[in-house]
Amino acid sequence: MSTVEMTIPRAAVVPPAGVNRLFAAGAADLASHLARFGPAPLGIAPGQLLGELEASGLDGRGGAGFATWRKLVAARTSAGPTAYSAPVVIANGAEGEPMSAKDEILLRHAPHLVLDGLLLAAAVTGAREVHLYSGPVQLASVRRAIAERTDARGVILDEAPDYFVSGEASAVVSAIETGLAIPRDRRVRLAVSGLGGRPTVVSNVETLAHVALVARFGAAWFRSVGTDDSPGTRLLTISGDGVDRKVIEATGGLPLAEALGAVGLDTSRLRAVLVGGYHGAWVPASDLWVRLSSRDLEPYGARPGAGILVALGDQHCGLAASVGIARYLAGQSARQCGPCVNGLPAMAEVLARVAAGGGSARLPDEVRRLAGVVTGRGACRHPDGTARFVLSTLEVFEADVRAHLAGYCEVTRS
Amino acid sequence: MTRQSLHIDWTACDGRGLCTELLGPLLVRDEWGYPRAAGYGSDVPIPSSFVAEARDAVALCPRLALTLQEVRAPARS
């Protein structure tokens, strides 16, 4: 490590300017990575890195948006004195959400940045065991990257199955422990007791890549783009209306219209945008000035989450599209928890009856009641996320709901 | 005296209904038979007048799906 540091002086590395940060190396190999970013400052004092992370405002990019520094501090302070009680850090690149592709793109094009972030997170928490959990294609890229360097040989690679809940934090721990990627009941936080009862950090791979940059260039640099409440850059996966999962790196707090325009979508021909993926919420096309920040998205029940945007073209009926998603989500239950196993299909089918048209005016209230019944009643948040999506559907497509109940569809004119 | 909360492990619960017998009307059965407390999810605050019944429910649950714990910050990460 120190030899590399001596041959490449820190001053020679210019922090990336503008929005192209995570992919600034231009290629996935170690030489390009070191030439652009310099070596990871693995000897940084834990307190210094935690302080920079706190000041940076970096939050988790896997969906939950939890402050990264808090997660690391929690695991560090829960550590016991022996190897059996030392923390574990797991880089989560499972990306079970079908409309997301950013973690795969990141692991294929910038695996060294993710490995740097993983090693930094391990150093700062005092972890003795480090994992990277992702799909087979991504792991092949990571394996090549690990072979290029000597400091990441201890990273254990775990293959993630490809289904919706496989990336949920407790499912990640289960997958590594038992080979079965299903959420588990949690009475204490993973940061206190996770893999094998040890304090465990499960962190999204994009989050870790940003950690690697903040460790090098600092919080002020991180915040030099983006907004006060959504600092830095974030990866977005944008789909819909002819665009299939295009990944871009965008400044935090970008207005939805600008993000959609960046991949060539005609924002004048949209009905709505699903923000945050299938566990997210709809924003109507009239409101595309809304910024991708927690503050702006809160009134819609959405969050920037994992940076997923799905545009719905104005030739499509929002209700019909939502029924398809609600049914998909019902089918993605891990089939462990009664309220989820029974409640999600019930909720999807009542929504389908609303969309089918001509039904009772009480159907929307029945959807809302079922959403209330399932919320909070599972080992993971799959029921909560599905309920949130369905409630958002009823709210944003309220006019369509009324039209369908009266027996016609304003979009398909049938 | 510390406040108690009843935690439901949904991965274990299969809706036998014993807890709802002991803890009604605090816990009622939903339409599929699973325990439900109005306004709460997996962690149900137990008033002191129900603590004895809650202990029985924990001990008698055939699926060992219940635990009684002292109330603290929500157990998520």
Image: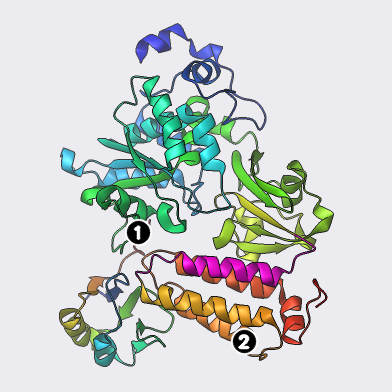
Which residue matches tag 1?
Answer: A182
Q: Nearer the viewer, residue A315 or A400?
A: A315
User: Could you tell me which quadrant the N terminus of chain A lies in?
Assistant: top left
* Mark 1 and mark 2: Cα distance apart in space: 32 Å
Give the residue type at disc 2.
Leu
Query: What residue do we see at 42% from left, 28% from top?
Result: A116
Q: Is residue A95 magenta?
A: no
- Residue A41 seen in render: yes
Give coordinates of residue A199: x percent, y percent. Answer: 27, 47
Which residue matches tag 2?
Answer: A363
Q: Look at the picture and state if A224 lies above or below A298.
A: above
- For label 2, count other residues whose C-alpha is less than 10 Å away and answer few (under 14), some (14-19) or many (20+): some
Q: Secondary structure at mark 2?
A: helix
**Stretch in magenta:** A313-336
Q: Secondary structure at mark 1?
A: loop
Query: What residue do we see at 22% from left, 51% from top?
Result: A197
**Mark 2 belongs to chain:** A
Q: Is residue A140 left or right of residue A244?
A: left
**Mark 1 belongs to chain:** A
Give coordinates of residue A399: x percent, y percent. Answer: 76, 77
Q: Is residue A330 magenta?
A: yes
Query: What residue do we see at 38% from left, 83% from top?
Result: B37
Give coordinates of residue B30: x percent, y percent. Answer: 40, 86
Same chain, labels 1 and 2 = yes
User: Could you tell me which quadrant the C terminus of chain A lies in?
Assistant: bottom right
Query: What residue do we see at 61% from left, 25% from top?
Result: A16
Q: Is residue A270 left or right of residue A296?
A: right
Give coordinates of residue A253: x percent, y percent. Answer: 66, 47
